[in-house]
Image (spheres, rainbow, N blue to C red):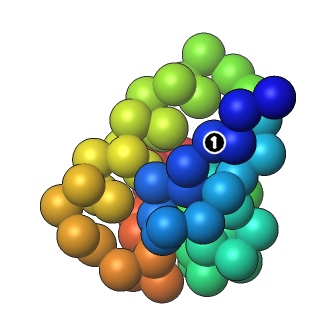
Amino acid sequence: MTALACPGCTGVRRDGQYLCGSCWSLLPHVARRALNRLDDDAFRRLRELRAQLAHGVPLNRIEITP
């Protein structure tokens, strides 16, 4: 099994997770709740997360549209 890089740090995330546990815990509760929703907009919210990380937004400032 190949280790997956965490997009929020230099750590490793598990398969099926957006971020490693350390980075996940730094996200605001509202963002974590939105990212946990499995509906038709789940992929859009993941793209929002990835775009903000690519633009250098600190994990504790990430905002995800519900």
Residue 45 lies, in percent from the top left, at 48, 38
Q: Residue furthest front?
A: 1
Residue 8 lies, in percent from the top left, at 47, 64
Residue 19 position by quadrant:
bottom right
**Residue positioned 66% across, 57% down in the render:** 12
Relative height, residue 40 to residue 65 (above, below): above
**Residue positioned 59% across, 28% down in the render:** 42
Relative height, residue 5 to residue 24 (above, below): above
Image position of 66 (left or right of 61): right
Callout 1, which amino acid? Answer: Leu
**Residue positioned 51% across, 25% down in the render:** 43
- Identify the image quadrant of the N terminus: top right
Image position of 40 (left or right of 50): right
Image position of 41 (left or right of 2): left
- What residue would you read off at disc 1? 4
Identify the secondary structure beneath mark 1: strand
Taking the image as drawn, is residue 30 in sight? no
Q: Residues within 10 Å of mark 1 (few under 14, many from 20)?
A: some
